[in-house]
Image: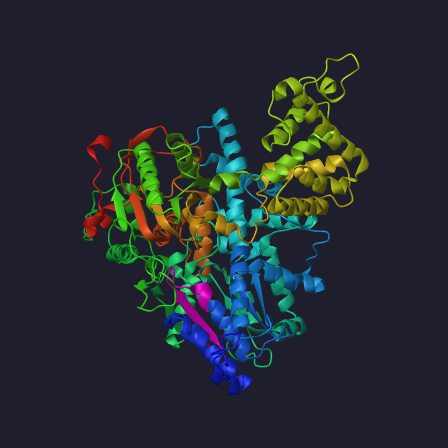
C-alpha cells in the first residue's frame, strides 16, 4: 500500500506538482506560520522598510524567515546576496542558524546570504581594498582604549604641554585661592580623570558621527562656555588621531571610516553594491549615523542609484539603552520609522508571546506613565510626580528628580521634546499562535511588588522565593537583574552566605571580572623571565593552584627561597610529594622557555593551563594581538611589556562561544546579571531588586573632587553640544542647557532600561525597593533611607493586587 506521504512529509497529491509549485507552497507555508508584523517583512519586495518591534515580538524569527523568502524569490547566490547585519556575534550566530533552517525547509542550498556584525562587515570591505582604505592589519593593532590607556594618557599630556593657557584656565576653575596643595590636587584630577574622560567621550562621539577635529574647532566658536570646551576636545581628538597613526593602531570607529573611504571610490562602490541584493539590519536603534550611511550605500542598486536602497531596518526605539555611553541615539531610528510611515512603509510588530498578561500590562503602564508625565511638564516649571499612580504632580519631591524632568532651556524641535518612549503597546498574541506556550500562565501573582526593610531583607526574600519557585518548577529559569555589577556582586555573596548549596547561582559579572587569560599567561611568563623572583614564583604557583594543576599547599613557603624549591641540592631534605608535583610543573615550563621560540610561548601556556575551548580561542587572540604589537622586536621583554599594558590598561575582550547566552538561561539556575546585559534574553522568573530613585532614574552628579570646575562634567556637556550640532540645534546650548540635556538623556534611558528589564520576564516579575539601602554600593553596609523609583508607587497604585504582604517576622 502506498504511504500517505513520502519520507519528507510531502502529501501524495503534491507529487503531481511542478518544482516551482512545490516551492511556492513551501514559501506560503512559512509565511502563514508568521504573525502579522512578521508577515509584512516576509512580503517585502524591495525598497526601504522600517520595522518597529516590541519586546518578545520575534524579530530574529521574522527577519530570518523574510531573508529565506527573499533568497528563494530572487534566486540569490554568493555573487549577489542578502547581507544581514546584527549587533553582536552571538546574535549573528543565532540568526544565521535560523536562516539555514528555513532554507532547508525550502530545499534550497544554504547560500545567497551572509551575516555580519557591523564592524565585521566594515572590516571585510576595508581589507579587500587596502590601497583605498589605508587599513592593513598586518602592521596595525586594534585597540579598545579606556581612561587609563597609554594612548589616552599620551594625548592628554601632549595637549597639556601644547596648551598651557587653556590648561591653567581649567586649573583655576572657580574659587581658587592660589594655595599650592590645592593646585597640585586639581592638576592630578585633570590629568588622571577629567581630561581622559573628556577625550574618550568626545573622540568616540565625534568620530563615529563623521566629525573631524577641525569641525569641532568650528563648533567651539558657536558654543558659549568659559572653558572653550569643544576647542579643548578638538585638541585632544587631534592628538589621539596623530598617535594612532604614528603607533600604527586602529580603533573600532576606524573600521567604519575605512569602509566608507573605500565606498567613496566609484569603481569599488559599484563592485561592492553589485554583490549586495539587500541589507537587513537588526537592533537598528543602536546604530550611529556613519554605520547607517554605510548600510544605505551598500543597499543601493548600482544600476539604479536614484532609487531608494533595498534596506530593512528592524529595531525598537523603546529598547534603546546605549545612548548615554555610546554615540548611538534612538532619534535616528525614530526618524527613519517616521519617514517610512509617511510613505506607508512602516511595519509594526506589536504581538508578543513572551510574557503573561499582567507583565504585559505592567510594561505598557510604564511606557504610558512615563510619556504622560514627560508631556505634562513640557514647557512648565520643574514639577514632580507625587507617586500615587494617578499622574498628579507637586513640587515636594526630591530636587534630583525634578531637575531632570525640567523642560526649561529646551529649544523648539530639540531632542528633549521627544518623549522617552514611542507610543507602541505590547499586545498578547492571538489564539492559535505558532509559538509554543505563548503568553504563558502566571506563576504566583504574575507581578509581585515587595517592600523589604533593607537590602539584607531583600536578599532573604529573594532567596526564599527562588527556593520555593524551583521547588515547584525545577525545569524553569530565573534571573536577578541589577543596575550595576557591584549590586550583583554583593547580592551573590549574600545569597551564598544565606543559602549555601541550596541555590545554584551564576553571577555573570564575576565571570566577566575574571578576564583571566591575559593575567594568568603574563604571570607564568614573568616567572619564566625571572624564575628566581619570589614574587613572580608565587604568582605563577597561585595560578597553577587556582586551576588545580598542583596540590593546594603553603605557596609562601615554596616561593620564599626559589632556588631551593626549583633546584634542590643533594644535601637538601626530600621534598613532600605536593612540593615535588609543583616543582615538576614549574620545571617543565622553564624547559619550554629554552626549547620554544618566543612567539609560541603564549599558545604553549594556554595548553599547559588546560584551558577550555573558549579560553584557548582567547589565548590565540591574545597571541595575535601581542604579535602585532611586537613586530620587529621579538623578545621576552617586549612581549611582557605588551601583556602588562593589556592587563593593566585595556579591556581585553575574551572570545565568547556562540552558545554563551545559553549559559545565562539554564534551568534551575539563578542568574545574576545587569539590566544592560540582559537585553535579548528572557527567563521564567525575573527579580528586579534595589529599584530606588537615586538609581532609576538617578541623576547626573559631579564628584566632589571635580566640583572646582563647576556643577557639571566637561565630558557630558561636550557630548550634549556635539549631539545638538548633529541634530541641527543652533545656537548650541550653553553649559547649563547642555548639562540639562544630558540629564534628560540619562533619565529617558534609565526608564527605557527599566522597561527592558521588566519585559525579560515570562511567568513572574518580582519587584522591590528596600526602605534602607546604601548611598553608594562601594560601601553596601552604610544604609540610609532611600526613596523608591517613582515607578514603584505608581505600579502599586495601578496593580494593588500585586502588592505582597510582608510577614511581621520580617519587619
Left or right of 771? Residue 211 is right
Decide which of 185, 809 is in the foreground and name it.
Answer: 809
Q: Quadrant of residue 517?
A: top right
Decide which of 500, 267 is in the foreground and name it.
Answer: 500
Left or right of 340? Residue 392 is left
Q: Quadrant of residue 643?
A: top right
- Which stretch is magenta? 43-62
The residue at the far front in this view is: 1
Question: How far from the left and from the top, in percent, is residue 222?
Answer: 46, 55
Whether residue 220 is situated above or below residue 113 in the rendered picture: above
Residue 357 lies in magenta, yes or no? no
Residue 46 lies in magenta, yes or no? yes
At a point 70% along the width and 62% down the height, the residue shown is: 130
Q: How many marks?
A: 0
Decide which of 711, 696 is in the foreground and name it.
Answer: 696
Question: How far from the left and from the top, in percent, is residue 167?
Answer: 53, 39
Is residue 698 in sight in this rendering? no
Question: How far from the left and from the top, in percent, is residue 662?
Answer: 49, 51
Is residue 107 in sight in this rendering? yes
Left or right of 630? Residue 610 is left
At a point 55% along the width and 84% down the height, the residue shown is: 19
Decide which of 582, 458 is in the foreground and name it.
Answer: 582
Amino acid at each position: 500500500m502506498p504511504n500517505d506521504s513520502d519520507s519528507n512529509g510531502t502529501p501524495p497529491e503534491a507529487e503531481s506538482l511542478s518544482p516551482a509549485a512545490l516551492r511556492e507552497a513551501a514559501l506560503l507555508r512559512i509565511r502563514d506560520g508568521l504573525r502579522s508584523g512578521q508577515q509584512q517583512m516576509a512580503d517585502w519586495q524591495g525598497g526601504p522598510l522600517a520595522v518597529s518591534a516590541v519586546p518578545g515580538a520575534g524579530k530574529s524569527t521574522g527577519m530570518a524567515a523574510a531573508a529565506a523568502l527573499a533568497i528563494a524569490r530572487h534566486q540569490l547566490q554568493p555573487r549577489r546576496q542578502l547581507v544581514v547585519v546584527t549587533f553582536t556575534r552571538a546574535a549573528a550566530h543565532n540568526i544565521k542558524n535560523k536562516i539555514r533552517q528555513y532554507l532547508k525547509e525550502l530545499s534550497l542550498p544554504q547560500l545567497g546570504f551572509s551575516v555580519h556584525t557591523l564592524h565585521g562587515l566594515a572590516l571585510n570591505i576595508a581589507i579587500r581594498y587596502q590601497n583605498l582604505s589605508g587599513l592593513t592589519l598586518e602592521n596595525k593593532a586594534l585597540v579598545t582604549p579606556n581612561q587609563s590607556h597609554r594612548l589616552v594618557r599620551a594625548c592628554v599630556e601632549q595637549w597639556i604641554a601644547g596648551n598651557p593657557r587653556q590648561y591653567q584656565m581649567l586649573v583655576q576653575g572657580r574659587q581658587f585661592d592660589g594655595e599650592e596643595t590645592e593646585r597640585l590636587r586639581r592638576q592630578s584630577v585633570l590629568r588622571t580623570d577629567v581630561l581622559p574622560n573628556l577625550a574618550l567621550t568626545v573622540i568616540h562621539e565625534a568620530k563615529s558621527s563623521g566629525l573631524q577635529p577641525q569641525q569641532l574647532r568650528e563648533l567651539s566658536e558657536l558654543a558659549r562656555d568659559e572653558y572653550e570646551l569643544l576647542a579643548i576636545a578638538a585638541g585632544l581628538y587631534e592628538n589621539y588621531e596623530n598617535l594612532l597613526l604614528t603607533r600604527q593602531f586602529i580603533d573600532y570607529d576606524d573600521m567604519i571610516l575605512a569602509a566608507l573611504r573605500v565606498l567613496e571610490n566609484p569603481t569599488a562602490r559599484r563592485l561592492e553594491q553589485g554583490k549586495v541584493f539587500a541589507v537587513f539590519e537588526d537592533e537598528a536603534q543602536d546604530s550611529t549615523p556613519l554605520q547607517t550611511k554605510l548600510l544605505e550605500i551598500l543597499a543601493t542598486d548600482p544600476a539604479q542609484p536614484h532609487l531608494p536602497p533595498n534596506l530593512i531596518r528592524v529595531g525598537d526605539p523603546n529598547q534603546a539603552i546605549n545612548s548615554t555611553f555610546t554615540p548611538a541615539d534612538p532619534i535616528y531610528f525614530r526618524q527613519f520609522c517616521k519617514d517610512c510611515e509617511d510613505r506607508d512603509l512602516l511595519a509594526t510588530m506589536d504581538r508578543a508571546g513572551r510574557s503573561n498578561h499582567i507583565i504585559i500590562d505592567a510594561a505598557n503602564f510604564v511606557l504610558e506613565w512615563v510619556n504622560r508625565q514627560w508631556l505634562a511638564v513640557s514647557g512648565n516649571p520643574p514639577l514632580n510626580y507625587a507617586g500615587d499612580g494617578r499622574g498628579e504632580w507637586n513640587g515636594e519631591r526630591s530636587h534630583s528628580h525634578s531637575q531632570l524632568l525640567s523642560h526649561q532651556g529646551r529649544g523648539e524641535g530639540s531632542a528633549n521634546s521627544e518623549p522617552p518612549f514611542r507610543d507602541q503597546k505590547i499586545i498578547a498574541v492571538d489564539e492559535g499562535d505558532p509559538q509554543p506556550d505563548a503568553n504563558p500562565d502566571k506563576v504566583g501573582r504574575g507581578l509581585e511588588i515587595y517592600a523589604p526593610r533593607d537590602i539584607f531583607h531583600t536578599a532573604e526574600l529573594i532567596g526564599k522565593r527562588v527556593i520555593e519557585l524551583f521547588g515547584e518548577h525545577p525545569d524553569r529559569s530565573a534571573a536577578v537583574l541589577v543596575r550595576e555589577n557591584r549590586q550583583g556582586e554583593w547580592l551573590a555573596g549574600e545569597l551564598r552566605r544565606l543559602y549555601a548549596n541550596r541555590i545554584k547561582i551564576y553571577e555573570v559579572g564575576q565571570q566577566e571580572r575574571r578576564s583571566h587569560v591575559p593575567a594568568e599567561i603574563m604571570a607564568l611568563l614573568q616567572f619564566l623571565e625571572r624564575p628566581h623572583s619570589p614574587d613572580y614564583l608565587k604568582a605563577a604557583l597561585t595560578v597553577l593552584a587556582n586551576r588545580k594543576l598542583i596540590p593546594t599547599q603553603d605557596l609562601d613557603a615554596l616561593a620564599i627561597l626559589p632556588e631551593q624549591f626549583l633546584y634542590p641540592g643533594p644535601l637538601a631534605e626530600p621534598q613532600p610529594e605536593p612540593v615535588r608535583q609543583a616543582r615538576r610543573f614549574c620545571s617543565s615550563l622553564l624547559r619550554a622557555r629554552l626549547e620554544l621560540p618566543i612567539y609560541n610561548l603564549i599558545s604553549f601556556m594556554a595548553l599547559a593551563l588546560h584551558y577550555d575551548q573558549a579560553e584557548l580561542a582567547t589565548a590565540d587572540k591574545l597571541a595575535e594581538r601581542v604579535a602585532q604589537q611586537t613586530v620587529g622586536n621579538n623578545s621576552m621583554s617586549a612581549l611582557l611589556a605588551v601583556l602588562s599594558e593589556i592587563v593593566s590598561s585595556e579591556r581585553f575582550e575574551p572570545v565568547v562561544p556562540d552558545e554563551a547566552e545559553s549559559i545565562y538561561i539554564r534551568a534551575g539556575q539563578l542568574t545574576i546579571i545587569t539590566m544592560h546585559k540582559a537585553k535579548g534574553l528572557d527567563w521564567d522568573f525575573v527579580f528586579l531588586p534595589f529599584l530606588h530613585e537615586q538609581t532609576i532614574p538617578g541623576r547626573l552628579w559631579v564628584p566632589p573632587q571635580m566640583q572646582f570646575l563647576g556643577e557639571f562634567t566637561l565630558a557630558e556637556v561636550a557630548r550634549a553640544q556635539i549631539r545638538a550640532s548633529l541634530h541641527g540645534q543652533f545656537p548650541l546650548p550653553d553649559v547649563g542647557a547642555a548639562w540639562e540635556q544630558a540629564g534628560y538623556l540619562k533619565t529617558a534611558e534609565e526608564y527605557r532600561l527599566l522597561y527592558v528589564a521588566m519585559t525579560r520576564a515570562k511567568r513572574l516579575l518580582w519587584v522591590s525597593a528596600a526602605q534602607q539601602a546604601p548611598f553608594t554600593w562601594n560601601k553596601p553596609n552604610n544604609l540610609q533611607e532611600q526613596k523608591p523609583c517613582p515607578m514603584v508607587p505608581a505600579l502599586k497604585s495601578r496593580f494593588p493586587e500585586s502588592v505582597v504582604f510582608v510577614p511581621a517576622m520580617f519587619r
